[in-house]
Image: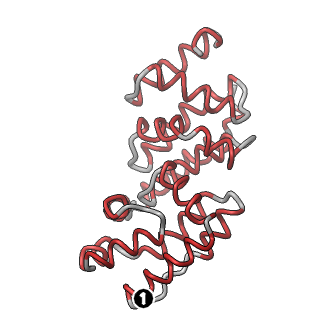
Amino acid sequence: RFSELTDTTLVQISDAAKVFGYAAETASQLQGTFMELGADERVAGNMQVAVGNLAKANKLAPGVIAKDLVDNSEYLATNFAGMPIEAAKAAIEVRKLGYSLSQASKIQDHLFDVQGSLTAQMEASVAMGKLIDVSAARNYALQGETVKMMEGISKQSGTYAEFQKASVPQRMLLAKAFGMEVGELQKSLYIREKLTGLSEEEQKYALDHLKTLDGVEKMS
């Protein structure tokens, strides 16, 4: 894809890759991902810089976000066609919850299997001794609302400490209710716990970079 880009864009995304610590090939692929979702070459290049800064402001590794976007082009095409900026924001918001776009895709597929996911939900509810209800997440999945879907899952999954105290069968059935493996859910809960609690100053810094991403189409 490098051969199709202008020299200005090549320099811009190569610099972004160096600054944010990912490979030039990833930068090229990310540029292509944004363009396939509807961004023109200029906007896609500006987005790489804005997304990298927004990731860092939220204490996330820009390279992880870039790879997540590149590796899930099919999921993004299904849920974010014509919305490249929203796709980038979703990748960051989902990661802040402790999950990846790959996991979001897997969970969405699970929720689309209505009968199977309802059965798993009931089994988990019995095992945990409380209601596990993924219906809200399913509704958001049907609407292609990735972040809201994952927020719905996050509300039902409990905390890392609670998961650690659960028995082996409880962990297995809880993970199954979300279409996940036990190790996946455990890691997600751990990551979410570590990423919570930005200070007021850090929140303002992150919000400033979110505004920059929202206005990326107006950048020269």
Q: Nearer the viewer, residue 183 or 148?
A: 183
Q: Quadrant of the N terminus?
A: top right
x then y, percent, for residue 130: 43, 89
In the image: residue 178, left or right of residue 90: left
Q: Residue at x 45, y 19 (%)?
A: 24
Q: Nearer the viewer, residue 212 or 64?
A: 64
Residue farthest along the bottom direction in this orientation? 129
Q: Quadrant of residue 174?
A: bottom left
Q: Quadrant of the C terminus?
A: top right
Amino acid type assigned to the residue bearing label 1 in the image: Val
Up/down of 170 relative to 144, above or below: below
Q: Nearer the viewer, residue 37 or 96?
A: 37
Q: Quadrant of residue 38?
A: top right
x then y, percent, for residue 13: 53, 21
x then y, percent, for residue 46: 61, 29
Residue on which the image places disc 1 = 126
Q: Element at badge 1?
A: helix
Q: Residue at x 42, y 54 (%)?
A: 202
Q: Nearer the viewer, residue 122 or 36?
A: 122
Up/down of 184 relative to 84, above or below: below
Q: Residue at x 62, y 75 (%)?
A: 136
x then y, percent, for residue 89: 58, 48
Up/down of 14 relative to 43, above or below: above
